[in-house]
Amino acid sequence: LYRSKAFTVNATSSDGTLAIELKLTSKGTVTKPFLVDNPDRLVVDLPGVRSEGSPTKSSTVRGIGKLRIGSDSKRTRVVFDLSSPPD
């Protein structure tokens, strides 16, 4: 879904199960993901990780509508806009 110098994001969907892999390629940490509703989305913060730009990517993976990435001086936030509520 997304690749940068700092991290990569991959996702697959099979038999109704959505699997997301976020891999750091630079220093930093991954916090525990959390869900937000209205609209449904999965959020992951990456403290200490800087992203180039703030891209929004459409997804062809079933279950994910869009992938949005934003950065400030302290962290990068990865947001998966879900196409349906999680079970």
Image (spheres, rainbow, N blue to C red):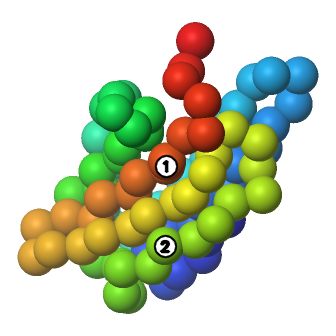
Instruction: Please say whether residue 49 is visible from this viewpoint.
Output: no
**Which residue type does callout 1 highlight?**
Phe
Q: Along the polypeptide, which appears first: circle 2 or circle 1?
A: 2
Q: Residue at x 63, y 46 (%)?
A: 64
Image quarter in which the N terminus is found: bottom right
Residue 61 in picture, x, y percent from top left: 76, 50
Separation of disc 2 and disc 1 at Cα? 10 Å
On the picture, is 10 further left or further right than 36? right
Q: Residues within 10 Å of mark 2 (few under 14, many from 20)?
A: some
Q: Residue at x 61, y 51 (%)?
A: 65
| Residue position for label 1 | 80
As drawn, the label of residue 55 is none
Q: Residues within 10 Å of mark 1 (few under 14, many from 20)?
A: many
The residue most toward the front is 38
The answer to which of 79 and 25 lies nearer the viewer is 79
As drawn, the label of residue 56 is 2
